[in-house]
Amino acid sequence: MHEMSLAQSIIEILLEELEKEDQVADKVFLKAGKLQQIVPESLMFYYDIFKVEHAKLKQSTLIIEIEEIEGKCPNCQKEFVMKELFFLCPDCQVAIEITKGSELYIDKIELF
């Protein structure tokens, strides 16, 4: 149910932004890091259910881009994309710092 409340929050943010515009949303681009553990199909399902109640969102499409998890070793300074949820440097086995992959934000809104 994480996606249901997230869809409601996205709708609220969009409505607040669209108050300033005399146009309606066409495409909404969302960036989400893999650490957010979003199921894109579920989020789009709830978004589609909630958007129909709002004229400025009724025809919009939610496009979700999932960002990879990236990390940096504080010991050897090596930076890498993490393929598995194993938070140790592959070279020196030190706990890594997550530099990307936990974000969640509306990147842009295309209007009609």
Image (spheres, rainbow, N blue to C red):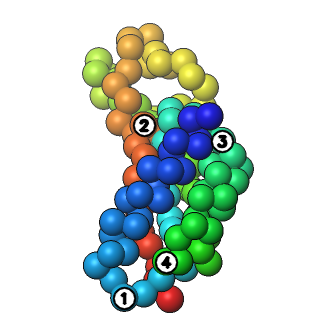
Mark 4 or mark 3, which is nearer to you? 4
Residue 22 at x, y percent in the picture = 36, 88
Query: What's under tag 1, amino acid-wise?
Result: Asp
- Please tell me which of labels 2 and 3 falls first in the chain: 3
- Give the quarter of the image for residue 85: top right
User: Which mark identifies residue 81?
Assistant: none
- Give the quarter of the image for residue 48: bottom right
Mark 3 or mark 1, which is nearer to you? 1
Mark 2–mark 3 distance (CA, rounded to whole Å): 14 Å
Write down the residue under mark 2: 102
Mark 1–mark 2 distance (CA, rounded to whole Å): 33 Å
Write down the residue under mark 4: 56
Mark 2–mark 4 distance (CA, rounded to whole Å): 29 Å
Write down the residue under mark 3: 39
Label 1 residue SS: loop
Mark 2 or mark 3, which is nearer to you? 3
Write down the residue under mark 1: 22
View extreme (top): residue: 93
Query: What's under tag 2, amino acid-wise?
Result: Ser
Left or right for 85, reference 24: right
Label 3 residue SS: loop
Q: Quadrant of the N terminus?
A: top right
Q: Which residue is depicted at the point 44% across and 10% down?
A: 93
- Please tell me which of labels 2 and 4 falls first in the chain: 4
- Please tell me which of labels 1 and 4 falls first in the chain: 1
- Please tell me which of labels 4 and 3 falls first in the chain: 3
Label 4 residue SS: loop
Which one is in front, 8 or 36?
A: 8
Q: Is residue 34 visible?
A: no
